[in-house]
Amino acid sequence: MARPHILILGAPGAGKGTQSANIAEEFDVEHVTTGDALRANKQMDISEMDTEYDTPAEYMDRGELVPDEVVNAIVDEALSQADGYVLDGYPRNLEQAEELAEMTDLDVVLYLDVDEDELVHRLTGRRLDPETGDIYHVEYNPPEDPEVEGRLEQREDDTEETVKERLRVYRENTEPVVEYYDDEGVLERIDGGQAPDEVWEDVRATIEDAA
Ligand code: AP5
């Protein structure tokens, strides 16, 4: 197929960012991620829009969803410029899923399925390299280089309290999106509780089968 249009779904901490990096490299597609796009524009002034708070930061630091109007525009712009892509972090609610259906067709919809206790453990132990954007975990995937280890940072919304709120928001808003694709018969469920390399084997095989 031409460069594929891939959607990756899963709860916070399911491994979407980790697997999207593999997908982008292997299938030569763009990684379109609303989380990273919003983090890069956290202080953007959205007060002209009909929103409760004035910046994305105020929603993100509480673990709440940023308003659809802001996020839909980011995704529309990014997808219109990408040949193939892996879309990560969107749609987060049924309204966004309907918007996405207007914007593009999807070749594969992956869902990484992981237990909730494991999600909390993964998120509170996650660390990021601010220079390369690489994702690590203090226990599962620590960096080998002490210089990298010394500069790792924790994401502001990875504290236990905000993680619990993000998971609540996920259950309320995003689980219906998973059901929506499942009802359409296009959802490819992957056991995201396995080790990262095993998850990757399943992800790669699923995308290749869809080709
Ligand atoms: P976003 O950045 O999209 O965060 P998220 O969906 O909460 O997902 P994460 O990035 O936290 O997790 P991940 O699944 O990518 O896991 P990772 O691979 O890092 O969104 C942040 C905020 O932005 C939202 O709360 C909201 O405010 C806003 N926002 C974003 N999109 C929006 C939208 N569409 N609408 C409205 N608002 C929006 O893995 C986690 C950890 O586990 C890492 O440490 C990793 O090393 C480790 N790990 C990964 N895989 C494995 C494995 N198989 N085994 C063991 N450890 C593993």
Image (cartoon, rainbow, N blue to C red):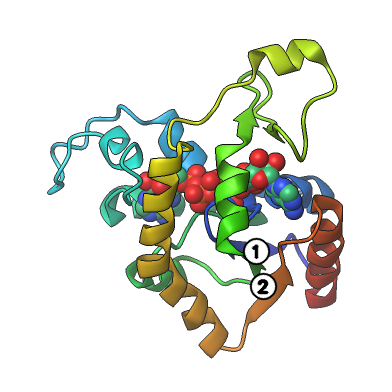
Q: Along the line of sight, which residue is nearer the eye, 50 or 192?
A: 192
Residue marked by disc 1: 5
Q: At 62% from the left edge and 30% from the top edge, which residue is drawn?
A: 127
Measure the alpha-carbon separation of dots 2 and 1: 5 Å
**Kind of residue at disc 2:** Asp
> Which residue is found at the position 44% from the left and 30% from the top?
156
Q: Disc 2 vs disc 1: Cβ atoms closer than 8 Å? A: yes
Report if the beta carbon of the residue with label 2 is closer than 8 angstroms to ligand 1.
Answer: no
- SS state under label 1: strand
Quadrant in which the C terminus appears = bottom right
Q: Secondary structure at mark 2?
A: loop
Q: Is residue 179 above or below residue 154?
A: below
Residue 99 in sight from this viewpoint:
no
Q: Position of residue 145 (x, y in %)?
A: 83, 17
Q: Residue at x 47, y 81 (%)?
A: 180
User: Is residue 76 at all visible to an observer of this figure?
Assistant: yes
Task: From the top left corner, tell me how far across and down residue 55 is, in percent.
Answer: 25, 34
Which of these two is toward me, 116 or 47? 116
Quadrant location of the N terminus? bottom right
Left or right, residue 183 beside residue 130: left
Q: Which residue is mark 2?
A: 107
Which residue lies at the image location 35% right of the left edge and 31% below the top edge? 42
180 relative to 8, above or below: below
Q: Position of residue 123 (x, y in %)?
A: 57, 43
* Quadrant in the rendering for residue 182: bottom right
